[in-house]
């Protein structure tokens, strides 16, 4: 089983960006936890981060036939990107949407996700642990389909 983890804009700044909201862990910490979780469950995981919407859209488009599922933290693109939404839908892969913070406890514009309706699940508010939980949920989903 092969998984892809995608992280959107500004997540490369984890560890220094608004630690009261996002915590003190780094993007490398999150990627390593996701990879370790996948390995523990008998899967492999590749990680990619970009601040550029088109690069994320391309990564999703290229995932079909290569990966069994995707975990994505679209970050700010969650609330703005029809392109990401359409790429997820077109991929026909199971996708879990992940957020470090609980977006419903934040600004009103963060309450709407363009991507969640085309994902199998949305997980938010668990901080760093959300990366492990999202991988666990995706692997459980894929195992149930076999």
Image (cartoon, grey):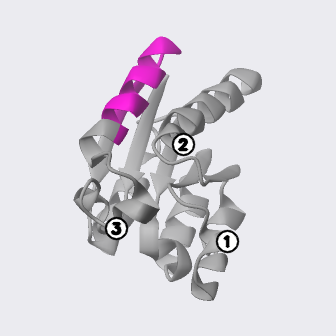
Residue 98 x/y as whole percent: 55, 53
Q: Which residue is mark 3?
A: 18
Where disc 3 sits, the SS reads loop
Q: Earlier in the sequence, mark 3 or mark 2?
A: 3
Rendered location of residue 82, percent (x, y): 53, 80
Query: Which secondary structure is most common in the magenta stretch?
Result: helix
Q: What residue is at 56 percent from the left and 70 percent from the top? A: 85
Looking at the rendering, the stretch of residues picked out in magenta corresponds to 30-46
Q: Residue furthest bottom?
A: 109
Task: Give the left or right position of residue 1, taking residue 32 as reference.
Answer: right
Q: Gap between marks 1 and 2, in whole Å?
A: 16 Å
Residue at the image position 27 percent from the left and 72 percent from the top: 52
Q: Disc 1 marks which residue?
A: 104
The residue sitting at the right extreme is: 144
Q: For the C terminus, give its image quadrant.
A: top right
Rounded to the nearest whole Å, what is the CA distance between mark 1 and mark 3? 17 Å
Residue at figure coordinates x 59%, y 76% from the top left: 106
Query: In terms of depth relative to the viewer, which is nearer, 121 or 57?
Result: 121
Secondary structure type for disc 2: helix
Q: Earlier in the sequence, mark 1 or mark 3?
A: 3
Residue identified by numbered label 2: 130
From mark 3 to mark 2, how far is it between C-alphas? 18 Å
Question: Considering only vertical position in the picture, is 136 above or below 48?
Answer: above
Q: Residue at x 41, y 40 (%)?
A: 4
Instruction: Check residue 35 for magenta coloring.
Output: yes
Residue 137 visible, this orientation: yes
144 relative to 71, above or below: above
Label 3 crowding class (10 Å Cα cut-off): few <14, some 14-19, many 20+? few
State the mark number for residue 28: none
Q: Position of residue 139 (x, y in %)?
A: 60, 27
Label 2 Cα neighbours within 10 Å, binned few <14 / some 14-19 / many ≥20: many
């Amino acid at each position: 089983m092969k998984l892809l983890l995608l992280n959107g804009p500004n997540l490369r700044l984890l560890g220094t960006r608004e630690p009261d909201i996002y915590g003190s862990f780094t993007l490398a910490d999150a990627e390593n936890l996701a990879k370790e979780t996948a390995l523990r469950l008998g899967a492999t995981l590749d990680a990619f981060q970009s601040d550029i919407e088109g690069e994320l859209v391309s990564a999703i488009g290229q995932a079909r036939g290569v990966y069994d599922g995707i975990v994505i933290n679209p970050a700010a693109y969650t609330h703005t990107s029809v392109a990401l939404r359409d790429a997820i839908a077109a991929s026909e892969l199971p996708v879990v949407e992940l957020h470090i913070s609980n977006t419903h406890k934040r600004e009103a514009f963060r309450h709407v996700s363009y991507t969640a309706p085309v994902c199998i699940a949305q997980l938010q508010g668990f901080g760093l642990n959300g990366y492990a939980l999202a991988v666990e949920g995706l692997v459980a989903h894929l195992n149930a389909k076999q």
